[in-house]
Image: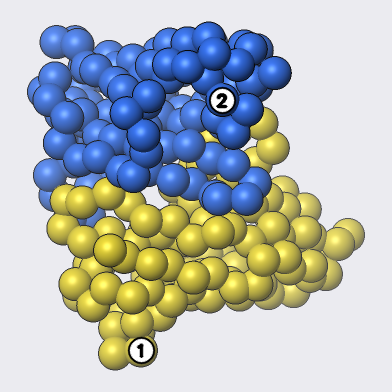
Chain colours: A yellow, B blue
Amino acid sequence: GENVEQHPSTLSVQEGDSAVIKCTYSDSASNYFPWYKQELGKGPQLIIDIRSNVGEKKDQRIAVTLNKTAKHFSLHITETQPEDSAVYFCAARVGNEKLTFGTGTRLTIIP
Amino acid sequence: KAGVTQTPRYLIKTRGQQVTLSCSPISGHRSVSWYQQTPGQGLQFLFEYFSETQRNKGNFPGRFSGRQFSNSRSEMNVSTLELGDSALYLCASSLSGGFTNEKLFFGSGTQLSVL
């Protein structure tokens, strides 16, 4: 089955700087890649997603890039703010099968 | 539109007991998936229901079961609880779960503690 690896497990950046989280997947048939943000005491919240026929997608300060050849995708957050502090999960899915999640990245924004 | 609602928010049980968790999906969503979240294992897929039928199943023992009702609400049951079942149980809904890029929306979860 699909296996998703996520790095780094923890990340601290100064407020205003950029943060990058990277994921790799194993199944070349995966064609949907969402990113979730989980704040303390809450469930994961979808923040951005990308399909395999798109190389990059941007939504305000958040962007995701996908490299199908290398089987990796990344989340980029620019101009980070304190409210960006959370745990971020990447995921991958083949067709209508289950979402397979990465192990999460705890992002801390230092004021 | 109301989000995914899970009840109860917290549960404390002892080993050997059984527990039932409830999930109400977003109005109009017909697919409900369940995930177990633990610090060590991350988010692990339990099962998915669509139109009252289990469509996908993860690698969990038979003590974990679920069902879906005609109004798309779902319940998850864990029998003969073990200490290792302590986790945050998350429910997620989507329109039909049948499309590649269909978005999955999560509830806030039920935190289960087994003593």
Tell whether label 2 touches label 1 (CB within 8 Å).
Answer: no
In the rendered image, the vertical position of residue B58 relative to residue B11, given as above or below: below
Residue at left 77%, top 59%? A108
Q: Of the residues shown, which amino acid type is indicated by label 1?
A: Ala
Q: Secondary structure at mark 1?
A: loop
Quarter holding the N terminus of chain B is top left
Q: CA distance from mark 1 to mark 2?
A: 41 Å
Quarter holding the C terminus of chain B is top right
In front: A108, or B91? B91
Q: Of the residues shown, which amino acid type is indicated by label 2?
A: Glu
Q: Does residue A33 appear anywhere in the picture?
A: no
In the rendered image, the vertical position of residue B104 relative to residue B69, given as above or below: below
**Residue B12 spot, x, y in % from top left:** 65, 12
Residue at left 60%, top 16%? B15
Q: Which mark is residue A70?
A: 1
Q: Secondary structure at mark 2?
A: loop
Q: Which mark is residue B82?
A: 2
Subunit under mark 1 = A
**Residue B35 spot, x, y in % from top left:** 42, 37
Taking A111 as reference, is B20 left or right? left
Taking A43 as reference, is A52 left or right? left
In the rendered image, the vertical position of residue A12 relative to residue A84, given as above or below: below
